[in-house]
Image: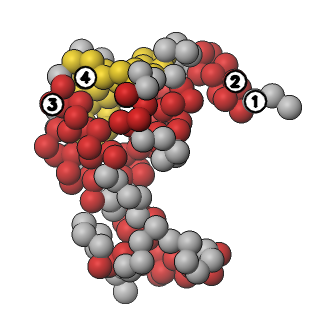
């Protein structure tokens, strides 16, 4: 059976970079709905950053806008370079960005302050699924979804012991 990463690399080589950037920007913007990080990105509004996966090779540039990202053709203020697997590991929180940087598997070029600010925001982001569902679904459907999720998740398998409504930057579910 082929390795999923090698399949992803082949697909990324075939798809046009502007299409990939557009789809990734839309996906990230959607995932940011209901998240405290979306408001914190306002400090970086108008800044552009490039993600370069050197092994594919692929370079996608984004501009930070209200509530998310959009594809950009402007010169980036900061470029983050690494291999595709390292970016996947970062997104899945299997790797720490500082560890990858000190192992020289991740490189940040350009405006140091912008790169550090972006890294710190992303590194501190704890995805809040209940807040996201509340932001994107009508209240009755969000409650039903959250009820279903709570039945699937074993007790004690939560990242935070505090209810979502009590965590900073998280709004309670609308009833």
Considering every residue shown, the one lying at the far right of the view is 1
Q: Is residue 33 above or below residue 143?
A: above
- Label 3 and label 1: CA atoms lie apart by 37 Å
Characterize the local packing of mark 1: few (<14), some (14-19) or many (20 or more) Cα atoms within 10 angstroms.
few
Q: Earlier in the sequence, mark 2 or mark 3?
A: 2
Q: Which residue is mark 1?
A: 3
Q: Earlier in the sequence, mark 1 or mark 4?
A: 1
Q: Secondary structure at mark 4?
A: strand
* Disc on res. 78: 4
Q: Which quadrant would residue 139 be assigned to in this image?
A: bottom left
Q: Which quadrant would residue 127 be assigned to in this image?
A: bottom left
**Residue at x-position 71% and y-position 32%:** 4
- Label 2 and label 1: CA atoms lie apart by 5 Å
Res. 134 in view: no
**Residue at x-position 53% and y-position 36%:** 88
Q: Quadrant of the C terminus?
A: bottom left
């Amino acid at each position: 059976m082929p390795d999923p990463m090698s399949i992803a690399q082949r697909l990324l080589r075939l798809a046009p970079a502007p299409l990939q950037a557009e789809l990734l920007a839309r996906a990230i913007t959607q995932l940011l709905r209901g998240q405290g990080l979306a408001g914190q990105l306002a400090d970086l509004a108008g800044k552009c950053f490039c993600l370069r996966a050197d092994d594919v090779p692929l370079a996608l540039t984004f501009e930070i806008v209200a509530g998310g990202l959009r594809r950009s053709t402007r010169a980036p203020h900061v470029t983050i370079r690494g291999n595709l697997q390292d970016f996947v590991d970062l997104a899945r929180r299997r790797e720490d960005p500082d560890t990858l940087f000190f192992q020289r598997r991740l490189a940040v070029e350009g405006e140091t302050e912008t790169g550090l600010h972006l890294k710190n925001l992303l590194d501190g982001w704890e995805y809040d699924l209940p807040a996201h569902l509340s932001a994107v679904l009508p209240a009755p459907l969000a409650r039903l979804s959250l009820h279903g999720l709570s039945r699937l998740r074993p007790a004690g398998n939560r990242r935070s012991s505090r209810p979502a409504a009590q965590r900073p930057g998280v709004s309670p579910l609308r009833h």
